[in-house]
Structures are given as C-alpha cells and as structure tokens.
Image: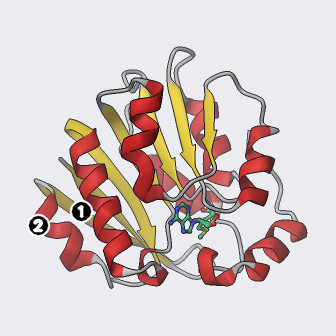
Amino acid sequence: MNAPFKFSDSIKLIRNIKTTGTVAPSSQVLIKRLLAPIDFGSARCIVELGPGNGCVTRALLSRMHADAILVCVEVNSEFATHLRTLNDPRLHVYNVCASSIGDVMAELNVEDLDHVVSSLPLALIDDDVVERILVNVGSALREGGRFLQYQYSLNNYSELKPRFKDVKLRFTLRNMPPAFVYECTK
Ligand SMILES: C[S@@+](CC[C@H](N)C(=O)[O-])C[C@H]1O[C@@H](n2cnc3c(N)ncnc32)[C@H](O)[C@@H]1O
C-alpha cells in the first residue's frame, strides 16, 4: 500500500520546515529499514511520533495485525486532519505534542507499548521537550520493546545510548537527505 510521491506533500513539509525539518517524505528504502526490527505478528500496540503526510503510517497499517492498534501523535493540525482520512479502525490520531504520549496512553487505557516509531526532528525540538519525550517513551515501552527513530545527523546519539539496553545504528544513502536509523531496545 505504498502511496506515490506527491509534490503537494513536499510543499507542506517545506512550508512547515521549522517543525518538519525536511523537504521530502521518507523514501520507501528508509521506511523499510526503519520498520525492519518489528515483529508484526506479535505487536499489538505501536505508537508513531511525527507521522506527517502518513508515508510511514500507511506502511505500518499495511503490515500490522488486524487486532493491533496504531496511535499517531502529530503536532501539525493539517497533517493530523489528513491522517484521519486514512479511515482505518485500528488508527487513533492525536493532534498533540509527542511529549504528551503518557496522557494519550492513559486516555486509551494502554499500559505497555510494543514499539514507538519516530520521525520527529529531534535536533530541532527544544532540549526540555526532547527530554520529556524520551522519558515518556522509556516508561511506556514494555521490556524488549523498541524505539525506532531516524535522523539526518548523530546529534541525539549520546542522549539515546544511556536510556536503552541496546542501541544499533544504521545508515542509508537512499533517502533525501541520507539518514541514520536508530534501533533502541528497552
Ligand atoms: C520529518 S517529518 C516526518 C514525516 C513522515 N513521517 C516522513 O517520515 O516522511 C516530522 C514530523 O514530525 C512532526 N513533529 C515535529 N515536532 C513534533 C512534536 N513535538 N510532536 C509531534 N509531532 C511533531 C512534524 O509536524 C512533522 O510532521
């Protein structure tokens, strides 16, 4: 269920560059690499932070179990409205900052997350907000759950490394711009 590249998606990303940090949606190669560590047969609750135009969201929904839920947390109301048009009963869209993930989970009555997939531009977000996001993610993930994040730099490596049992780092040139993919296991 891959959507074709749409010029209008890039226009929205560029118009909001201070909060998106990019000019083009993630490539299919990057998305495949980002989601590769997830066992979709067993995962029942996945959170996506910074879904934007929904390119990662669609890839998640196409792989997820029929009984699983996907919680998308997007700060931009235009993107959040667009995501709701995906119209999938497994999808819950919240138009709030990712630092509110604890409140979102409480509202949904979810105690343990299997995985958190994030496209957040951590390097552009204020340090105290990044700290709140990472603390919330760390306490929401189940043991063995993963935080999967891509970034265009290694800026946040030192913040991620001490919070997780294991942090693997990969790199792909096949994205604009080329990206690092973090696989952090609790
Ligand atoms: C690089 S874009 C990613 C879009 C898409 N997931 C992709 O991979 O192409 C980053 C997204 O994070 C969202 N974002 C930025 N700061 C956020 C925050 N504090 N909380 C939630 N979403 C945020 C932006 O609005 C944008 O949609």
Three-letter residue code for mark 2: Pro
Under circle 2, the secondary element is helix
Residue under the point 41% across and 41% down: 103
| Closer-to-camera residue (15/176) | 15
Left or right of 71 on screen, residue 162: left
Name above or below for residue 174 compared with residue 167. below
Residue under the point 60% across and 74% down: 175
Give the percent coordinates (x, y) of residue 37. 36, 45
Three-letter residue code for mark 1: Lys
Q: Could you say which quadrant of the image residue 74 lies in?
A: bottom right
Q: Using a 10 Å C-alpha cutoff, classify the residue at mark 1 as few (fewer than 14 neighbours), some (14 to 19) or many (20 or more).
A: few
Residue under the point 80% across and 72% down: 12
Residue of label 1: 168
Give the percent coordinates (x, y) of residue 66. 57, 16
The earlier-in-sequence mark between 1 and 2 is: 2
Residue under the point 58% across and 82% down: 177
Q: CA distance from mark 1 to mark 2?
A: 12 Å
Left or right of 3 on screen, residue 127: left
Give the percent coordinates (x, y) of residue 51. 61, 55
Residue of label 2: 162
Name above or below for residue 111 compared with residue 50. above
